[in-house]
Image: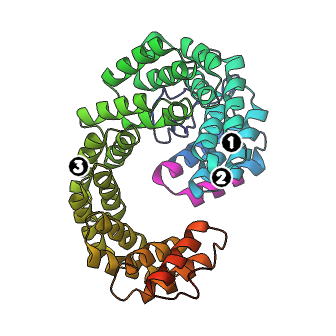
Amino acid sequence: MSRSGLATHREPAVLAGVLISLSLALPCGVPAVPSDPRAALTEVQQLIEKGEYTTARNRVLQALKKFPNESALYNFLGVVEVQSGDYRAAEADFRKAIDLAPQFTGAYLNLGRLLQEHADQIPRAPKKALEAYQRLLKHEPGNVEANYQSAYLLQLQGSYPSSLEHLARLPADVQGRAQALAVRCADYAGLNDRARTESAEEELARSADLTEAEVVSILPTLEKNQRPDLAIKLFAALAGRNLASVSALYRLGLLYERHGELKLARETLEKVGQQQPSSVPLLVELGRIADRQGDHKGALGYLAHALDLDPQNASVHFFFGMVCVKEDLAEEAYRSLKKATALDPNNPYYDYAFASVAMTRQDANESIIYFRKYVEPKPDDPRGRFALGASYFYNHNDELAPR
């Protein structure tokens, strides 16, 4: 996950999610270029700012025919390729710019950001991004963004001491920002240093620039190190400061449920429901929590609403039917479970549940049919065999029951 945008300049963006920055500075250590390439760079910059990426790309390619060793042109070309969605080409362009000017800070940063922002489309992207930042730090050891991004990536891969070393290189004011505090909190959690973890978490929760992105960014590390309590505290801090999106509230509700805090889970998801009243998955989740609380009538209310919204959802019919069984609503259970088997005829568990309910009715012949459907794909399950035998017995089939 990258926390900044592509840039064409040599000054790093400091731990921020910025858009493309376009100041026309040349790479460090590169002598002043003739007026023609500078004019070409200026023109391309203006085209990019206007969003005319196709024209900008054509101008860069034309300029490269005349100035094939101009690193800044390759850097601009990489920016244009990113906008067109050709990330492999953009990666090659940024690397070419670095090859031509090994101290071109902006190209290193652009390469790193590209690899982080589009990691799902570029092989080994996180590893290559870390390598890019590490190369930059060899000639510019104090670069703020490279140190922060290195700390972040090292934290993700579990190299917590190395991550903390990079955080320590940041200026004091930057170390106090939410992004750095989040990485520090995750590092200490990974090292199982509970006292420092709690301290970093409290400082992060109070930080003036806290956003949801900081919390989400360290969730993989918190989950890997079995610290859902920290995730709950941080999401709760966001919610308490009205900084949590609907997605964050949903995550918090699920975390409360996993942590056994069913009352808080239900209250939190109810708040989500106020903003997403037509979400079937949310209603099912609320139904599940209410069922776990023993509030079966409440669960049926959520599930009935879900069925109004999606009457062809087999799993919701099944869930509704099973809760009806708990409430001794035999007829409602029968109808809903039968609907589930009709909508999903190849689900043996639905067949078993429906057959179990059907066997209690005055005409229990249906139960035989559905227990058979269960036994066919699961011939070695003794529960199915026993249930089928019982069904034969209750239907007075004394020949087949003993088998």
Residue 266 percent location from the top left of the image? 26, 47
Q: Main SS type for the magenta part?
A: helix
Residue at image position (66%, 32%) is 108
Q: Is residue 341 magenta?
A: no
Going by the numbered disc 1, the residue's amino acid type is Ala
Residue 261: which quarter of the image? Answer: top left
Q: Distance between the residues labelled 2 and 1?
A: 8 Å
| Vertical arrangement, residue 286 with respect to residue 175, above or below | below
Q: Identify which residue is drawn at 27% across, 65% down.
A: 278
- The reply to whether discs 2 and 1 touch (Cβ–Cβ < 8 Å) is yes
Provide the residue span drawn in magenta.
47-61
Crowding around mark 2 (Cα neighbors within 10 Å: few <14, some 14 to 19, many 20+) is few
Mark 3 closeness class: few <14, some 14–19, many ≥20 residues within 10 Å: some
Residue 241 seen in render = no
The foreground one among 110 and 301 is 301
Residue 90 in picture, x, y percent from top left: 67, 48
The tag earlier along the polypeptide, 1 or 3, is 1
Front disc: 2 or 3: 3
Q: How far apart are marks 2 and 3 (CA)?
A: 36 Å
Count neighbours of disc 1 (C-alpha within 10 A) and say few if under 14, some if 14 to 19, many if 20 or more: some
Q: Mark 3 highlights which residue?
A: 271
Question: Quadrant where the C terminus lies?
Answer: bottom right
Tell me the amino acid under the disc marked 2.
Gln
Which numbered tag is attached to residue 125?
1
Residue highlighted by disc 2: 121
Tell me if 161 is positioned left or right of 208 in this view. Answer: right
Q: What is the x, y in percent for residue 38? A: 63, 38
* Foreground of the two, 261 or 197: 261
